[in-house]
Image: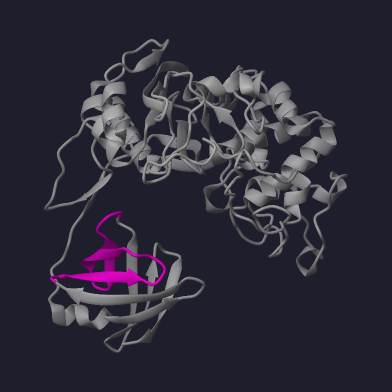
Amino acid sequence: MLHHLLTLSLLSPIAAPGNEDVPEIVETAILPTWWIDTEPPEPQPLAARMAHFHTPAVSVAVLLDGELAWARAWGVAEVEGKRAADANTLFQAASISKPVAAMAAMVLMEEGELGLDEDINTLLDSWQVPDNEFTRTEKVTIRRIVNHTAGLTVWGFPGYDPGGERPSAVELLDGKGNTDPVRVFRTPGMDWQYSGGGYTVLQVALEDISGLDFATLMKTRVLTPLGMTRSTYAQPLPATLRGNAAFGYDGGGQVVAGGAHVYPEQAAAGLWTTPSELVKYLAAVQRMAGGAEGLLQPETVELMLTPGKNGHGLGPILSREADGPRFGHGGSNQGFRCNMFASIAGGYGAVVMTNGDGGFTLGQEVFQALAKHYGWPGFEPQIKRVVEMDDAALAVYAGTYELEGYGKLEVEPGNGELRISMSWEDEVDRVLPEAEHVFFDADDRTPVVFDVVEGRAVALTAGGRFRAERVGD
């Protein structure tokens, strides 16, 4: 049913005004972002890739020469009601909410309402960050919150069913919702750790400073000045906007309970918007970075776009490609995946928003197609090479491993590869060898690296961060 509806709806995508036509490659010749060198893929229509990822709608906007070039949506905003998506359909921006919210802090900083390096507790009235052994010499500050070095807990949020109860922002900071309390777990400024909880502290602080609820603050001080007049941080989404808002869908194509979860963590995850509205944010940052008059002074934008630890600026994530530096951010809410990027000086960028949990990879494939058409560097596909290993060589890695907090993994060799089964999942992963002790997942290229001592694997690390120790043969 989902595939049938997608095919029907893709016959007549709806576009927003722009100066260019949609490049043909986007609709007809999408490729994966990686493949094995001996198994090159055939290009596929966008409709086929949407069906593959169980993603009902994709909405795209492209920025060229500092202006919106085109915006278009494909698919359905709501499968059950056969409601087509268009370029004005609202999607949850998820963590893209963060850099836009950080801009409000920069506005209030320029107006003298706050200092980026003040102890956040001097700005908070309705709640306080509990002091502990980690805050004796260093304090949580707005600068550290927005670049994720404040040492605060709670990385992300599952959201709430719109028909159920949900906490206020202050209540959820004390763990009275479906996430842990937000607390300092390491010395502020010492290291980097992504923290949606930190942005919720920022949300409460900005409300206390301004005397406004967060949605009103963002509308009056950031969204409206940027021309983002259809965007809102209101949670839940107002009834007047629900008619053209996308429903979210999980990785199997099932609708999220209530259509979309509600996020009282507005600064971290609460923005509803469209790709063309986010292009206005990207273009404004580009112009201000180039010295043009705007919402912020150029020196403030320079601070925002200076990479700190792990490539994070004051809100945006920074990177550097062959043609210069870029900024952007991604987002992942229940049933929604999105991403955006822009050059700082080149005047180009793009936004992809989807209403499916499989939409992040699909979005990367769309970025890759756009990059090929427009000549943007940094989106080239990764071609993986598999090396030959016989069963005797693979036997070094066989055994039982334990990943703390998750469970056991069984590694079995055979047919030139390893098969890894996990006690907490029903599926078995195939991992292929690409170098001595180095493998990758055949489905999603997640790296799996083994530590080998005296001819026997003693541990494996997946994705560069999940380490499992051998506990048996």
Q: Is residue 223 above or below residue 354?
A: above
186 vs 424, nearest the viewer: 424
Q: Tell me where residue 327 appears, x and y as whole percent.
A: 50, 36
At 65% from the left edge and 23% from the top edge, which residue is drawn?
A: 223
The part of the image, by quadrant, that contains residue 354 is top left
Note whether residue 97 is visible.
Answer: yes
At 34% from the left edge and 13% from the top edge, which residue is drawn?
A: 20
Q: Tell me where residue 144 appears, x and y as whole percent.
A: 69, 50
- Left or right of 346? Residue 134 is right
- Left or right of 1? Residue 280 is right
Q: Tell me where residue 77 appears, x and y as whole percent.
A: 43, 27
Residue 179 within the magenta-colored segment of the rendering: no
Q: Mainly helix, strand or loop, the magenta region?
A: strand
- The quadrant in which the C terminus is found is bottom left
Q: Tell me where residue 332 appears, x and y as whole percent.
A: 50, 43
Q: What is the number of callouts on the image?
A: 0
At 27% from the left edge and 41% from the top edge, which residue is drawn?
A: 52
Q: Which residues are magenta?
A: 415-444
- Left or right of 374? Residue 108 is right
Note whether residue 228 is visible.
Answer: no
- The quadrant in which the N terminus is found is top left
- Left or right of 49? Residue 220 is right
385 vs 229, nearest the viewer: 229
Q: Is residue 441 above or below residue 277?
A: below
